[in-house]
Image (tube, rainbow, N blue to C red):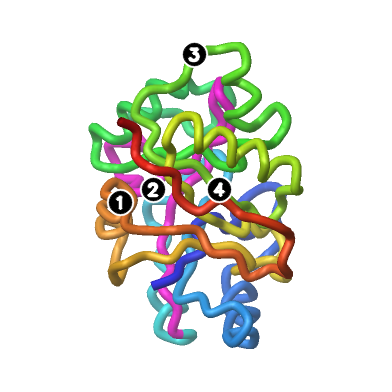
Amino acid sequence: MILDLHVHSEASDDSRAPVESHLRILQRKREERPIDGIVLTEHRGFDLDADYRPLEDRYGFRILRGAEVETDYGHVLLYGVNPDIVARFDFKDVRLPAQEVISEVRRLGGIALPCHPGRTNIGLCEHYETRPPLEGVVAVEAINGGSRGEEDRRVAGLMERFGYRGYGGSDAHLVAFVGLCATEFEDEIRDTEALVTALVEGRFRPVDFRARRGAIPTAAPPSE
């Protein structure tokens, strides 16, 4: 099963893409982007009451939800967000303590994964140059639809050094980019709980549907 794990809609302040428009693009481009579903990771917020089941039924795509938060180590995607996690953290805080986010989100039933780690200022690589590595990171975003070649190379080095696995997401803020990068799972992902389990257990790999742009990191070997 293939999911785009990093998608923004008009619920994010820097996107104007309705969720339904993302699905229409994926429906039209199924052959070149064989995506089974998306995970909405809106910036600095999470609506516990949002329900996308009518759109799932209409278009035949799985729609799951996460969030993108900002930490002192860069941007991080949260999956398995629940009322306890929402109560624990102020998602609007742009300097959340990354170590606390990773540890507490996992304790509360979710998982926190750094995204676009090769990017200047908001990526993990740059912070690791001057600060100690975070504990509990199981994977980083190996391919991101908006990343450039140099960023991908930085991420490959990060994964090799720390043994991180890699996942993929389009980081689509515009509908044209949805599904260009994604993550292939060994199992069917029926719900958010299954998504978290698969991510924790490492049963996935990043996939790239863009034109070939050189070697893309897939999964680093587990740390000894």
**Residue beneath label 1, please?**
196
Q: Is residue 200 rendered to the left or right of residue 73?
A: left
Residue type, mark 1 in image: Val
Q: Quadrant of the N terminus?
A: bottom left
Residue at 51 percent across and 75 percent down: it is 35
Crowd rating for badge 1 (residues with CA inside 10 Å; few <14, some 14–19, many 20+) = many
Please tell me which of labels 4 and 2 falls first in the chain.
2
- Name the quadrant containing residue 26: bottom right
The residue segment tinted magenta is: 60-86
Magenta segment includes 123: no
Give the SS element for disc 4. Answer: strand
Give the SS element for disc 3. Answer: loop
Residue situated in front as seen by the camera: 115 or 174 = 115
168 to 2, vertically: above or below? above
**Residue beneath label 4, please?**
142
Q: Mark 3 to mark 2: distance in Å?
A: 24 Å
Residue type, mark 2 in image: Tyr
Q: Nearer the viewer, mark 3 or mark 2?
A: 3
Residue at 24 percent across and 41 percent down: it is 109
